[in-house]
Structure formats: C-alpha cells, structure tokens
Amino acid sequence: MSELTRRDAVKLGALGAVTLGGLAARPAYADPVIQADWVLKWSPNPATDGLRAFEGLEDDRSGSHKPVKHIYVEGDHFRFDMHTRDRDGSDRQRNESKGMRSGNTVHKIMKDETWKITYQAFWPSSLTATTRFCHIFQMKVQDVGGPLWTLTPRAKDKPTMTVDTRRDNDALTSHDAGDYTAMQNKWVDVEWDFKASNSGGYLHWKISDAGTVLADGRTTAVDLWRDKNYLRPKWGIYRSIESAGLKDCYQLIRNYRGYKWQ
C-alpha cells in the first residue's frame, strides 16, 4: 500500500471520534494515528481473509481433541480456544497462529527492519495468570529455540502482565507491565514497535484501554536478530499444564495491523 501522508494521518486522527449529543464518543475501534514514515503492510479482514491472514496455524498438533477446531473466525475477530484436555506434548498446550500473510505474500521481518504491530485483544477471566509459562503473544524465529519476547500473564503477588525478553547471551529478563486484572474482560489496544537487530535494536510495548495507558515500556537490552530466517509474530495460547487453576479459556483478537518503517 502507498505511504501514508501527514495529511492522511491527520485525517485518521480526526475520524477517530464521533459526535454523540455534542460530546466526542470513542468508536468501537479507530486506527491509531501513524507517522508518515510508517507504511501499512498487513491489515487482514476476518470476513474475507479468514485464517489465510496468517502464514500458518498450530492447532492441536498432537490430535488430542479431534475433531474440534481451536482457531477460527467469529464475527469481526479471530478466536483462539484452549481446553484443559488439549495437549501439545506431555507437559504443555499450544493453539497459535503464526506469521502475517496478505493474499499470497508472507510478510517476513528481516534484519535491521523496524516494524509496528498493533491489534485489539480480549482476555477473559478464564484466561488465568499462571505460575508457569502462559504466552498469549510471542515473537519467534523459525528453527531457533526460545522466543525473542513474549506477553505472559503471571501469578505473582497479584496477577501481573509481563513482557519477557532475551539478551544477546539468551538471558531472560521479565518486565512487569501492569495489573493483568485491569486488562481483562474488555477490548484493549496492544502495540509493539521494534527494530530487528543484534545491536542497536529495541522493543517498545504499550497496552491501552480506550486511550488510558495501562502498560508502557521500552528496552534496548534485547537481541532481536538470530542470524537466520526471519522474525514472525505468534498469537494464541501456549501454556504449561503444570500450573494450578487452569481453565477452559480463549483469547479474542481483532483489527490486526502491521506497519513497516520506510
């Protein structure tokens, strides 16, 4: 798609509110105002793109819950289901989508590229914070071990949303991103922007509720290039079965956008 002009960005901002009784009311969703140098590459429509919005799916790979489909379109959003019986190996569960696709084009995040990925997520009470891993977003490299970063609700003193990142030496750092309970049972805006580099890279994250910022953080102590293949995001639920209190649950996501800095 063609590059957004600054005039277009201003128009987007102006369209972000509607008038209701003389007062500005927030619509169900308005695209964020994106700087002129961000170029929209990916904006799938669930109704027309369906699951081809993604490069691939990892839906009950072990066949533990046939013939149930755990990833599907539901109205204006994508739904990711997880049941306590689902298995992806003996000690974990995984129902995730991976990558970004527009038609026959797979959008690959390559070395030294800068991207912004935004979407809206709904995390119900049943999607509990856990004592072991429970990733609801990952940035991965195919055929490389652990994720470069994850979004993970943790059962600490109180349920806490965390962003877990890895350094050049693969050391893990967990960043507390806010009260997970305050982010649940509503549509929240999630935003990532990052540079995929060994050095000079960064990761910025933000989670907002109708314009109120619930989480906002940035780190440069992260390795976002692994010298092979390419980066691709993953959405869904990937969790250990060794946590107490697991429930049948789901995650809803809508209004995916992928922008590349050019």
Image (tube, grey):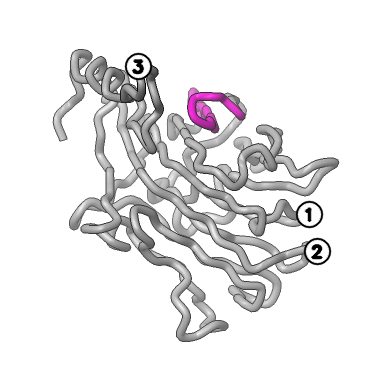
Q: Secondary structure at mark 2?
A: loop
Residue ID at (44%, 44%)? 227
Amino acid type at mark 3? Gly
Q: Which residue is mark 1?
A: 131
Q: Which residue is mark 3?
A: 22
For this view, does 157 lie left or right of residue 129? right
The reply to whether the C-beta atoms of the residues labelled 2 and 1 are less than 8 Å apart is: yes
Quarter of the view holding residue 158: top right
Q: Which residues are magenta?
A: 199-215
Indicate whether residue 213 is drawn in magenta.
Answer: yes
CA distance separating discs 2 and 1:
8 Å
With respect to residue 227, does 215 lie above or below?
Answer: above
Task: Name the spot of residue 219 as percent of width and height, x first.
Answer: 59, 25
With respect to residue 120, does 55 lie above or below?
Answer: below
Amino acid type at mark 2? Ala
Task: Name the spot of residue 109 as percent of width and height, x first.
Answer: 36, 42
Q: Which residue is mark 2?
A: 244
